[in-house]
Image (tube, rainbow, N blue to C red):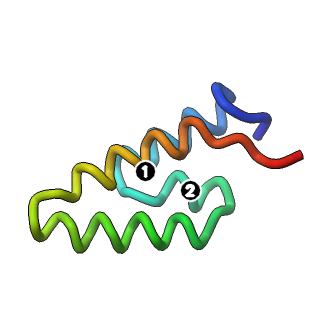
Amino acid sequence: MSGQGSTGNVIAALASFFIPGLGQLLQGRLLMALTQFVLAAVLWLMLLGWLIHLWSILDAALFKPRA
């Protein structure tokens, strides 16, 4: 993936829209994916999971790999 706005980031953001952390997993960022998935699951119990869900989508869309 070549960075922000690339097709890979768009696909990752769409994946994170459905399952928080899935986009990060597609980008190869296992620790971030696990963190966002667990936080979203826990916070949805308190009806605040949408915050992590939104963060997950934006993080996947704006990710720039280090060159």
The N terminus lies in quadrant = top right
- Helix, strand or loop at label 1? It is helix
Q: Position of residue 59 (x, y in %)?
A: 51, 45
Which residue was labeled with disc 1?
Answer: 56
Could you say which quadrant of the image residue 5 lies in?
top right
Residue in view at x 89 percent, y 46 percent? 67
Could you tell me the amino acid type at mark 2? Gln
Q: Are marks 1 and 2 in contact (CB under 8 Å)?
A: yes
Q: Earlier in the sequence, mark 1 or mark 2?
A: 2
Q: CA distance from mark 1 to mark 2?
A: 8 Å
Q: Position of residue 6 (x, y in %)?
A: 68, 29
Which residue was labeled with disc 2?
Answer: 24
Q: Position of residue 33 (x, y in %)?
A: 51, 65
Residue in view at x 79 percent, y 35 percent? 2
- In screen coordinates, is 15 left or right of 19? right
Between residue 39 and residue 20, name the one nearer to us: 39
Identify whether 57 is placed above or below 38. above
Between residue 46 and residue 34, name the one nearer to us: 46
Could you say which quadrant of the image residue 63 lies in?
top right
